[in-house]
Image (cartoon, rainbow, N blue to C red):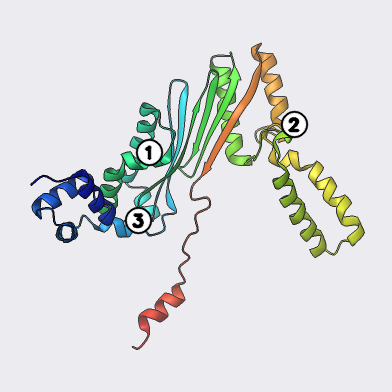
Amino acid sequence: MAISARDVKALREKTGAGMMNCKTALSECDGDLEAAVDYLRKKGLAAAQKKQSRVAAEGVIVNAGSGNKAVLLEVNCETDFVSKGDDFQGFSKGIADYILANGLADIAALKAAKTEEINELTLKCGEKIDIRRFVVAETNGVLGTYNHGGKIGVLVDLKTTAEGTGINELAKDLAMHVAAADPKFLSGDDIDEAYKNREAAIYTAQLKEEGKPEQMIPKIVEGKLNKLAKDVCLLEQVFVKNSDLTIKKLLAETAKTLGTDIAISSFHKLNLGAGIEKKEDNLADEVAKMTKGQ
């Protein structure tokens, strides 16, 4: 019998199994949706859906580049053991290459295109697999990239006409600096009021906790805010490889050496698992549950 796309979609949403597996199940069950669900469960193909509700905070950050284009990608799983496996690493690298080759910019579109592969890897590894986020950078200048053990990934876009070893080394150094110094903004002009207000509230609470006189606190907070750019703005930060230079001064000196202008157009950084609430296991509680009633 003919199997409609609507039925395949319904079964896929119900089980999380791949499209071809859903079509096969419906064909084998004469179009009976519930029977097809049981068919997939017996085959173990519906198990992926249950795993997708679990927390995946491990994984890898992948850098990939081609020509004047580069991508940063985070793919998550549940355990560090799976994240280091060849299957997971190969899948993640393949996803990054796919983004570059197809010019994707939307995470929903990427997940939709890779649903079957995600489910297949979920079943093979026995863990939830999630393509969480990615950033694409394209430049007319030079891209600096850095990856710290799959835990931190950075892209830095330099606006420049310079070519060769000197500018490439600068781009790499800047990417490494971003990984280490964790800037939030490019320059002081980019710091938004919401961020300033949040920092001011934190400073105020800290000073009260330290017992500073109430009338002195606003002035101290103002001073701290004036120095904020040195901590959170890339151009104002002290270069991690040379404490005598700020990033702004480093750019100026390198530009003079290479005989051309150099400016940072943008930078991007991904930290593995940032913002994901990890489950904290309490060994004592687990043992208590296991031994209860014995």
Mark 1–mark 3 distance (CA, rounded to whole Å): 18 Å
Q: Which residue is mark 1?
A: 109
Amino acid of disc 1: Ala
Q: Are marks 3 and 2 in contact (CB under 8 Å)?
A: no
Whether residue 267 is situated above or below residue 121 in the rendered picture: above
Say if 83 sits above or below 242 in the image.
Answer: below
Specify the label residue 244 is tagged with.
2
10 Å neighbourhood of mark 3: few (<14), some, or many (≥20)? some
Label 3 – label 2 distance at C-alpha: 49 Å
Q: CA distance from mark 2 to mark 1?
A: 46 Å
Asked whether residue 126 is in view, the answer is: no
Question: What amino acid does circle 3 point to?
Answer: Gln
Query: Dot 1 lies on which element?
Result: helix
**Tag 3 or tag 1, which sits nearer the N-term?**
3
Which tag is nearer the camera, tag 2 or tag 1? 1
Q: Where on the picture, by quarter, is residue 173?
A: top right
Residue 134 location (% of width, % of height): 46, 38
Name the one closer to the observer, 166 or 184: 184
- Tell me the residue that label 3 is attached to: 52
Q: In the structure shown, which secondary structural element does the residue marked by tag 2 occupy?
A: loop
Q: What secondary structure is marked by label 3?
A: loop
Q: Residues within 10 Å of mark 2 (few under 14, many from 20)?
A: few
User: Which residue occupies the extreme right position in the image?
Assistant: 215
Residue 175, image x and y in percent?
57, 32
**Which residue shows up at 68% across the image and 23% down it?**
251
Does the rendering let one see residue 279? yes
